[in-house]
Amino acid sequence: MGGSPLRFLKAARLLRVHRNPGTQSSSTRGRADRRVSHLLLHRARRPHPLRTRVALAQCASALLPVGPRRRGESNVEQGSEWCGVPSGLTPNRRPSRTVLRRCREPGAALPGLGETRGICLSPLFYKMWGFLKRPVVVTADINLSLVALTGMGLLSRLWRLTYPRAVVFDEVYYGQYISFYMKRIFFLDDSGPPFGHMVLALGGYLGGFDGNFLWNRIGAEYSSNVPVWSLRLLPALAGALSVPMAYQIVLELHFSHCAAMGAALLMLIENALITQSRLMLLESVLIFFNLLAVLSYLKFFNCQKHSPFSLSWWFWLTLTGVACSCAVGIKYMGVFTYVLVLGVAAVHAWHLIGDQTLSNVCVFCHLLARAVALLVIPVVLYLLFFYVHLILLFRSGPHDQIMSSAFQASLEGGLARITQGQPLEVAFGSQVTLRNVFGKPVPCWLHSHQDTYPMIYENGRGSSHQQQVTCYPFKDVNNWWIVKDPRRHQLVVSSPPRPVRHGDMVQLVHGLTTRSLNTHDVAAPLSPHSQEVSCYIDYNISMPAQNLWRLEIVNRGSDTDVWKTILSEVRFVHVNTSAVLKLSGAHLPDWGYRQLEIVGEKLSRGYHGSTVWNVEEHRYGASQEQREREWELHSPAQVDVSRNLSFMARFSELQWRMLALRSDDSEHKYSSSPLEWVTLDTNIAYWLHPRTSAQIHLLGNIVIWVSGSLALAIYSLLSLWYLLRRRRNVHDLPQDAWLRWVLAGVLCAGGWAVNYLPFFLMEKTLFLYHYLPALTFQILLLPVVLQHISDHLCRSQLQRTVFSALVVAWYSSACHVSNTLRPLTYGDKSLSPHELKALRWKDSWDILIRKH
Amino acid sequence: MPPATGGGLAESKLRPRRGRCGPQAARAACRDVAAEAVARSPKRPARGSRRFEAAGWWALLALVTLLSFATRFHRLDEPPHICWDETHFGKMGSYYINRTFFFDVHPPLGKMLIGLAGYLSGYDGTFLFQKPGDKYEHHSYMGMRGFCAFLGSWLVPFAYLTVLDLSKSLSAALLTAALLTFDTGCLTLSQYILLDPILMFFIMAAMLSMVKYNSCADRPFSAPWWFWLSLTGVSLAGALGVKFVGLFIILQVGLNTIADLWYLFGDLSLSLVTVGKHLTARVLCLIVLPLALYTATFAVHFMVLSKSGPGDGFFSSAFQARLSGNNLHNASIPEHLAYGSVITVKNLRMAIGYLHSHRHLYPEGIGARQQQVTTYLHKDYNNLWIIKKHNTNSDPLDPSFPVEFVRHGDIIRLEHKETSRNLHSHYHEAPLTRKHYQVTGYGINGTGDSNDFWRIEVVNRKFGNRIKVLRSRIRFIHLVTGCVLGSSGKVLPKWGWEQLEVTCTPYLKETLNSIWNVEDHINPKLPNISLDVLQPSFPEMLLESHMVMIRGNSGLKPKDNEFTSKPWHWPINYQGLRFSGVNDTDFRVYLLGNPVVWWLNLLSITLYLLSGSIIAVAMQRGARLPAEVAGLSQVLLRGGGQVLLGWTLHYFPFFLMGRVLYFHHYFPAMLFSSMLTGILWDTLLRLCAWGLASWPLARGIHVAGILSLLLGTAYSFYLFHPLAYGMVGPLAQDPQSPMAGLRWLDSWDF
């Protein structure tokens, strides 16, 4: 069995320059020793026939002798096995001296081995003189299985990446944002933080995309200026790298090489993951960072045991934080994995606190390092994403209207063109437009026009028949108001200007009609509990003008604050009735031209955006005469200086708007509910060839999905069983196996749970692809459970053999299913209607069949 | 404070309590410490002083209870008009007295009790409870208010006993009792006909009996053990029976029970049979008993409400058949649909209603300007439709024509009886659900176009079968566009009279929204059959009323541009609720927590988290705590932990809820937070006193601290009592008002 040293040499991996073996820390050695002894113990208890019998293992053993070799019986062989134990791409896992010495013993018996190993095994003085006697040797340890997995991953994800050369499903949506990035136009997207869009845009940047493509329809052919390959490259790479990463994670969980291969091979043939990675979509990138976070945490945790505060320890700890924040930066869903990693880290930290062999200072340093890496770094990075986002997008665009005036003014073009250079302080006599801060249902400006409220409404109620005041969602000359001092008659700014302050009494005079804003105890047209707001017309019917308003600056620093253009958020409180000027959100009927209703709210409670206004356009009024003023109002405002918002102000506004923006489309043809995901009762048709019936579907490998759920159920039941038995002091598993089992369960089953269960609480439209991150964790759990069954539940050699055979059969069926569904994954083959019908295994699958 | 309590305290606190001691080693340590403490504690007091102590104990409890009752019943009759939600719950109480069926989003127990109290106190159910502010006049309302105040008064002694049991400290219990007695919010909420005092009564009763039964754990299967265990179950059923918020206390008791069983299971001295007995006892008392009681309340509810009333339309046709006065009750209607039948069509999804149309058009800009088609929950003439053949417009009721039954798969036309327009759909987007097609009424006197044709299908049946009234689940498929008639369940704006939107959905997924049944059926040419066979069984009714309640709850969505209370407002006492009165001439009652109490609670939670984590870390680091400190930290971690868990469970779930939230939803959590305050300050002051033991006045610190807290809350109650007992005169914004200086936050408007 796998004792052949030649194979061992072939399998040696990891580029390694052995320069200074003397500096290897004693803790490394200790760890390696522990590991060896652990293997010894482990093996003494039970042989592992599974690994030699299973096809997985066979294919693996052809590449790498590790799995089979574990069955070796002598110490010597174990030692050499350790040398071959895959250590991933990590530079920290240098085999220690002791172990290497063991390696040399068989090596010495076999010519050839000892020579290559000689340098790395030499003690200090050997090393000092060694380079004089022999050449410096660079040994490259390459885990061929990793290479092969990466290669296969790349092949499966990159193969004919530019096909189809048409917009596929959500590319229509992400594509728009890529174009916005390319053109540097500001946009607002509520689906997630900007990092994800930036990753996609990076692809466009590398491919030299100019952003000129109209993303309007799924299935539209890409024009020649769209670099489809490079746009799809980054998600595909992320998807491909997830395959070797799965291998690494299972290995870091201290499961066998064979189980690790199994996890990776399952990732490789999962159709849904392939489809999702080959397009301009973000799920594969999210999965990549999720896995990276888990992997680097595991690496860090394994470092923790033997070399805390070493370089690699720091590296993996930091990488955990970085990967977490990248995952969050791609989609808010990433928070789930972040919380999981934080939780595991917290439990481990709690154990650390309980470790009384460590000094208080040491524990404190440990906690501090974790807090910095897992809390501070992610926050900083998250801010950084937004910083870059806002730096990149500096031009005004289609989503400007959603943002506040101040934000809009900070963008190039758009509102800034108008507001640049307005006077900052609003003075008596200023001409202003007032925008409602709430902006729902649409952003609008306080407005009035010649028409009056109808004498009698449709429902028989009466009105004051005075001039209408509304909120109007378009820029218009009727949106201009003049801030007047009630004690003076003039409507121009005196010199020097007298600024308006918090608490001042003002009148608001409508620019074109010169009537002033008024409210009184008359029910508003659509909200009868509130007061009507009008521009006062004196009908001589003993209804006096009540046109005094007190100005309240909501976001003032002190009570003497000045009313500032754009920056100040103000409320107008009616002096006579203490009603507050408010946008009710209702649309007036035809007589009000379907503009929005403005009311005086008597029972105003606390802060609400709909009662708050800000000045958007502003200039100092200069002419007293009505006609001249009209001319003045029709002409564009003058320009002088520009003002900029701080990054934090822009960030917090953008973040709030993103979280508050709610799209109400709760249904989509392919939307589904979380319950349908587990059993794969639904699919999504991504693309259909315009002429043939070649098509791409998001459709999972049903064997993997079902067995993943099954593995989860088995895991939970087994854990519950073990837990109950342990509570009664019956230990079925040795302690280390139990710890391994628990850690693997917390990360894999827990990863599935945190990425899946929250969807039951969400009200947004859900799609099958939301399940993919949870699915990857399920895939990681599968081999863990299989190995556990084989190691601990199969009692005889025969059982184990049978079990291995079953596993092989199961894997082949998964491969077969994957291959059968391949035409729907890649969409490269046009199937006949008959074949398509044959693929419709579940009635709920929506496979498109052309009617001819 | 009798000095003997100090010794008793140390001893009882250090007794290892079930389920919380954790690993064996720690428990052994616990025991050592306990033994040490017992050894060091002063001699047991003589029998005489013990009796004295017991008398004092009872006297204190009586005092607390009396004070609570006094504050709650003081000026209970004012104001003599409907305040706030009394308009709902009083009305529902009346429904019980009148035995008319109604619908509410909460389970029935609370309203049933209110009704019962009204009934017993001589209220005849004739008051209309129309809107807040209506005068009660000669109607007797004090019975109902008195009942709520009675239950509300028990909160204080319950909290007192709970804290006493958790901390074994009279001062902590007294502090808690004072906080609750002097909280204007709790007081206000207990004085009116509302569900909240009843709900809180059951929550606190459950908490108290759970704590009591935990402390009986050393005598399992004894009489008090059974008593408290089953009382917990009864209270849980009560809490859930009043509002679904009761689920949170159920969760807390559940967690406690799981921890308890886990501990018992790990105790190797107990045989598996004993553990099985424990498990069975808990299943019986905490699952079976509450469920039985809860179901029983529904049985009573269905039995009492036997007359048709305003809630009918929310329920399915079969359900209505059992309400006397409903047109389906004892009704007999033709069994199979035939052409010419006049029918009403009801959506199968709960609380959607009947297919409806009326003489109003869709407004401009919303699809085609044709007649609106909606669904409507109430019975109305506009719900009637006539089934006609698609190709002829002759009157099928003409006696010369033979009866022709409608069959599965037929192409039909549905004509609205009142307006003679056909049910119609076309390629215009629906008003709210943009991806569906609009459904309208179209045509004049039944003459329309081919867009009026629908194929009628029975779900899961073969083609050609006849269609049965009530029982067939049918779909209408639009012939031209191939879409399915359904209701999205979204509320139309004002122009649609806030009825629900009807659309034609192009997605053929089978959901209840697009399945209908025929309810009323009038066809003089057909023989009638009796509908009594349709009456649903009790479990079906139970299930259905839950579905309707859940839908109703999730349907309470806040609208845009509306001020809504946010959960983060609550603990900081950001804003109150107007119970009565707006203007300065009105009698005003304002639900607002006593800010001193509430802000102290807020501070205590922070302090608790801080001190709790310091102690936990110290213990995890293996610090050796002196016996007294160890005892106090056990109280803080275990007793305080229980209460903190209660606060968390009763507060944080509201952040996840999409429905409209109100300030009073916080009050159950507030009870827990007050208990935490009591435990925390008592423990902290004791720790302080211990830390400064060398100082001569150290013992005084504890007493002085507790006293000043007690007096402080009492004084703040004196300041703020007009909020609860009512005030007349200028609003607080006015500097003239006596309350002007008390408007500490701008957002308070009393």
Image (cartoon, coloured by chain):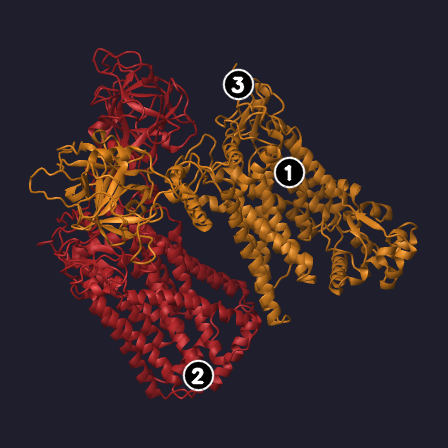
Q: Do labels 2 and 3 share a chain?
A: no
Q: How crowded is mark 3: few (under 14 residues within 10 Å), some or many (20 or more)?
A: few
Image quarter (top left, top right, bottom left or bottom right) of the N terminus of chain B: bottom left
Q: Are marks 1 and 3 on the same chain?
A: yes
Callout 1: residue from which chain?
A: A
Task: Give the number of the disc on residue A237.
Answer: 1
Mark 1 secondary-structure assignment: helix
Q: Which of marks 1 and 3 is nearer the N terminus?
A: 1
Amino acid found under the numbered disc labelled 3: Arg
Task: Give the number of the disc on residue A538.
Answer: none
Q: Which chain wears red?
A: B
Q: How crowded is mark 2: few (under 14 residues within 10 Å), some or many (20 or more)?
A: some
Q: Residue at x 59, y 25 (%)?
A: A164
The residue labelled by disc 2 is: B692
Amino acid found under the numbered disc labelled 2: Leu
Image quarter (top left, top right, bottom left or bottom right) of the C terminus of chain B: bottom left
Mark 2 secondary-structure assignment: loop
Q: Position of residue A752 (x, y in %)?
A: 55, 46
Mark 3 secondary-structure assignment: loop
Q: According to the rendering, which colour does chain A have?
A: orange
Q: Where is residue B629 in the image (x, y as percent from the top left)?
A: 47, 78
Name the quadrant containing residue B209: bottom left
The residue labelled by disc 3 is: A850
Q: Can you say whether B473 is above or below A736 in the image?
A: above
